[in-house]
Image (cartoon, rainbow, N blue to C red):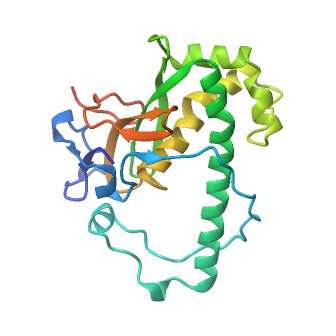
Amino acid sequence: MPFVFDQTQVEWPDDDSDLPAPRADQFVYLPPPDFGGAREPVHFSLDVPPEPPAPAPITPVMKPLSLWDRLRGRRHPTAQITPAVRAAATACAAREEFTRQRLIAVAVPALRELGVQRLYCRYDGGNDEGFAWLDSAALRDGTRIDADALAQRLTEQRFLDRLVDHGVMKRVDRTSERDQVASFVRDWLCTEFATLLLGRGFGTGEYVMYGAFAVDLDSCTVMDDPKADPVTSNIEIAR
């Protein structure tokens, strides 16, 4: 959970307007484990677990933990978590892991075939949602390409066929093959790696945040970048 601007102690305007955009020097870097994410380097594999059954829909009635509750390691009291809620949460987590592993198991070999060695992804968000997107891909020959160029090469490789054949996604008749691949590469793939690093629900809380991380396709690891530039897509930073 890298660069964070805490909003819990900020006084909101009386007219209910938005807070002014924070400056880059007002953000504080928090290593992912301090936020509740994984210890680095985060390792991933290409193994796909057996497909679990779909979880039954259950709506837990619990107050969400604040950012600082999570930083201090606080958890919901056990008494608030019923067996049905606990079972549903376990089933949802298993389903999410299966979906993520299936996606990674299809995407990583395809990227390696193109000579991709490393992905550099950025993320931002806060309050309601977190976002992640591909900044660039480093190839084994030392060149670096952007998300559009990578999407074009994957399209020429018939990458969408692989995604569809393995049940990762479905074809959208009104969207071109290249646009579907581009959406997968720019957003979905990086969001899954961001979740591995930062945890489920990253970017939700009384704060705004930004950062970047690298995905090494040889060592199958994800590492946060503690020196990431303040490049954002969904939040505003005052210059």
| Residue 112 found in image quarter | top right
Quadrant containing the C terminus in the rendered view: top left
Count the labels in the image. 0
Residue extending furthest toward the front:
219
Q: Is residue 1 left or right of residue 51?
A: left
Examine the rendering and report whether any part of residue 176 can be seen: no
Which of the pair 212/112 is nearer the observer?
A: 112
Q: How far from the left and from the top, in percent, is residue 207?
A: 31, 51
Residue in view at x 33 percent, y 48 percent: 1
Q: Is residue 227 left or right of residue 52?
A: left
Which of the pair 24/217 is nearer the observer?
A: 217
Residue in view at x 69 percent, y 56 percent: 49
Residue extending furthest toward the left:
25
Relative to residue 68, is residue 172 depicted above or below? above
Q: How far from the left and from the top, in percent, is residue 205?
A: 37, 56
| Residue 150 found in image quarter | top right
Residue in view at x 65 percent, y 48 percent: 47
Q: How far from the left and from the top, in percent, is residue 183?
A: 63, 29
Examine the rendering and report whether any part of residue 126 can be seen: yes
Q: How far from the left and from the top, in percent, is residue 6?
A: 24, 52
Relative to residue 209, is residue 38 depicted above or below? below
Residue in view at x 73 percent, y 25 percent: 159
